[in-house]
Amino acid sequence: MLLGVDGRSEIAESRVKLYIFLEKYPEKAEQAMSFYGNSLETSEIRSLLFDNKFIVGIDLNLDGRTEIEVYPTISEAELARADVRRLLAKMLPARGLALLKACHTLQIGFSQANDSKVLYFHPIDGNSFAESLGNEMAKKANAYYRHKDVRHLVVAIPELELQKSSIQRLNMYYA
């Protein structure tokens, strides 16, 4: 489990985020996916469960709303498989596939609260990855962490942003 706080300048927009990591627990993954019913997204999620690694995220918003997000996790070994690459090529924008070449893990976040899927890139070299995005705020944020003891970076980019000429919305998570 992992717990995070997403603090915003407007306190009502802040939230507590709870992540539950599931591995080889398909009945709980199915239970989490049941929030989508029999939608196209549910079949997409199922198609991404290669090794039964799955994260369920629960957003406890301070305004009283609760949202569920599910994250199939695709490992480096799975990303190396030709069948997985073909499947991702059908699902992801070309720009997302290009960024994926510099990553060891990908998570795809599905939530009815978001306007599109969110791709969570786990880059091999966080500094080069942040620089390659062409986003000035990402470069500035990364400059602060460049010489810190960063063990891991995750960059979250909505799929809709990857279809545009430049990435304007993204989140960067440093550990």
Image: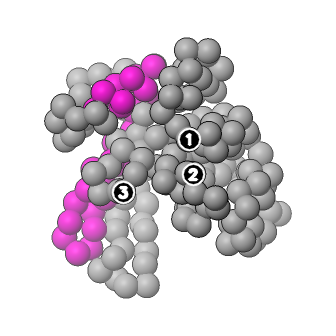
| Location of mark 3 (residue) | 115
Is residue 125 visible from the viewing direction of this image?
Answer: yes
Q: Residue drawn 34% across and 82% down?
A: 11
Q: Position of residue 90 (x, y in %)?
A: 50, 28
Residue at image point 55% right, 51% down: 163
The residue under label 2 is which amino acid type?
Leu
Find residue 36 and report its image quarter.
top left
Q: How many marks?
A: 3
Left of 145 or right of it: where is 11?
Answer: left
Q: Say which amino acid is labelled 3.
A: Asp
Image coords of residue 134 (percent x, y): 73, 61
Q: Where does label 2 land, which residue?
A: 162
Residue at (48%, 54%) from the top-left corner? 160
Above-or-below relation of 135 to 76: below
Marking on residue 93: 1
Q: Residue at x 27, y 51 (%)?
A: 112
Which mark lies nearer to you, 1 or 3?
A: 1
Task: Determine whether, in the image, residue 85 is placed left or right of residue 70.
Answer: right
Q: Which residues are magenta?
A: 42-69
Determine the secondary structure under disc 1.
Answer: loop
Q: What whole-number distance in Å separates the C-alpha atoms at marks 2 and 3?
A: 13 Å
Q: Position of residue 79 (x, y in %)?
A: 61, 25
Q: Is residue 79 above or below residue 167?
A: above
29 and 36: which one is in front? 36
Asked if marks 1 and 2 touch (Cβ < 8 Å), the reply is yes
The image quarter in which residue 26 lies: top left
Image quadrant occupied by the N terminus: top left
In the picture, residue 54 is in which quadrant?
top left
Magenta highlight on residue 62:
yes
